Image (tube, rainbow, N blue to C red):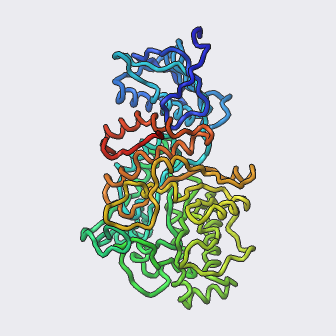
Amino acid sequence: MAGMLVAQTAPLEILPYPNEVKVHPGHYPFMSCQLVYPNALKNEADYLKQLLLEEHGLIVQHTKQGNMQLTLSKWIPHPEGYRLTVNEQGIRIEGSTPQGVFYGLQTFRQLITTHQGQIRIPYVVIDDAPAFKWRSFMLDDGRAFKGMKEVKQLLDEMAILKMNTFHWHLTEDQGWRIEIKKYPLLTEIGAHRDSTQLNWYESKVFDGKPFDGYYTQREIKEIVSYARNLHITVVPEIEMPGHASAAIAAYPWLGSTDEKIKVPCTFGVKNSAFNVADPRTRTFLKDVLDEVMELFPSRIIHIGGDEVRQEQWNNSSEVRTFMKEKGINSAAELQMWFTNHIASYLKSKGRIMMGWNDITGDKLHGYQSEVTIEAGNQLSEDAVVQFWTGNHDLLRKAAKRGYKIVNSYFKYTYLNFNHDRITPGLEYDFEPIPLEKAYAFNPIPEGLTMQEQKQIIGIGCQMWGEWIPQVEDMYRMIYPYWAAHAETGWTDNKRKNYNRFVRSMDYFLTRWIDKNYINSHNIGIKQHQ
């Protein structure tokens, strides 16, 4: 250890940046890898073998004594934390769980450089753990189906960025993307639309091409297993009671009117809502959730709950009669009753309900009733709230009430709002999000007590599917923007630095260009001058 007494201060080029780094003079030559690991870390060892072979042509040997060790160490306090040590004796990655060791590998891979034909790694000691327990990426497959290959590729990149939750938006007005065996028409009818609207919400232009696609239960099991090996939890989102047009097109009796509809070809908020007053509809939704829970071991199940237009409920004699019988005074209270009904059902199955912050009962949209929720008619205390819209006073109120919150405020975290979304000649009703603004986001707003700050469990970034018909369009929205959100989720806010972040992008930009996710002409990253 002689020669390692004075630490260097120049930051390493790592994303997300570790929370405690000591860099010492010198480098370890890494021309071969003799790997030592216990059976409990075989998955992580196999991952390391594959990445070293693919990125550096190194073949790893499993030995009892070697120059690299993967170790489980109980003394590391955080279940996702790790210590990475590189010195004259070799490389050691420790974690209290396989997940922590896995994240150590993601840091390790970015430290490897080549100098005069020699692979080497700087002498370092890194002690690291995430700032937030929830670090998610959401894919909207409902509006624009992507397929198993693309989902796996996204999971691969999430893992390198230490994102631990894949939020999978599987149902929408414009498409139902998950096989439910008890209700086959959900995919036979609900997964298909005749055409797709182009340009923007008021556009009369359509592509004239049928659009379809869904995931079989076999495919979903494969994706969930693939994600598990990358230490990513897959959280499914099944929208209810709004965003229900595709399901109602398949089974019209689910709707709140007698109208028979087709799967919409246009985007925007639709009028269709499940008739939650009908016990058949509630049984249907529980049946769907039962099959979903068989496929997804995640403790959290997302039910959406956003943007429910209430006109159909208000105009339905069946719904009004049900509300009178239950002592429900408004459509807003009916949604709260239904949401808590589903929360109770999920709780009986050992699961926790999550939804967008519309489920708290606060009026967020101009088309909703002015009637407010009575103070005694509140959201189930077990619910997890994903904040996406409104002002931060609503988030503060939810935190004060004791709800766990994921902050996904759209003005910072919507990937489809980045600058590359702009098409010349079209008018937009959103403010584009440059990379620097996305990076500046702090999920914990000002004005919270220390206890209330603890209610903010993480950050989510969202890839919505309107106007993103092709995979290439999706890549243009995601890369490199989600790296900013990944660092926000992992790195303490006081240690974030935008210029250092930009300088650290080389590893990822090279990787993403090599994989044809982006090209060198559409990156547009700028440092402060």
243 lies above or below 1: below
Which is nearer the eye, 520 or 469? Answer: 520
Residue farthest front in this picture: 529
Asked if residue 93 can be seen in this view, the reply is yes
Q: Which residue is at the front of the view, 409 or 260?
A: 409
Q: Residue furthest top?
A: 2
Q: Which residue is found at the position 35% from the left and 15% from the top?
A: 116
Q: Position of residue 408 (x, y in %)?
A: 55, 56
Vertical position of residue 442 compared to residue 25: above or below: below
Q: Using the rendered view, name the quadrant where residue 248 is placed.
A: bottom left
Above or below, 122 against 162 in this view is: above
Residue 30: percent from the left, percent from the top?
43, 17
Query: Against 88, is 418 above or below?
Result: below
Q: Residue lying farthest bottom?
A: 317
The answer to whether 411 appears left or right of 155 in the picture is: right
Q: What residue sits 58% from the left and 81% below the top?
A: 277
Q: Position of residue 367 (x, y in %)?
A: 53, 79
Q: The N terminus is located in which quarter?
A: top right
Q: Nearer the viewer, residue 416 or 300?
A: 416
Number of marks drawn:
0
**Residue 59 falls in which quadrant of the image?**
top left
Q: Can residue 167 be spotted in the picture?
A: no
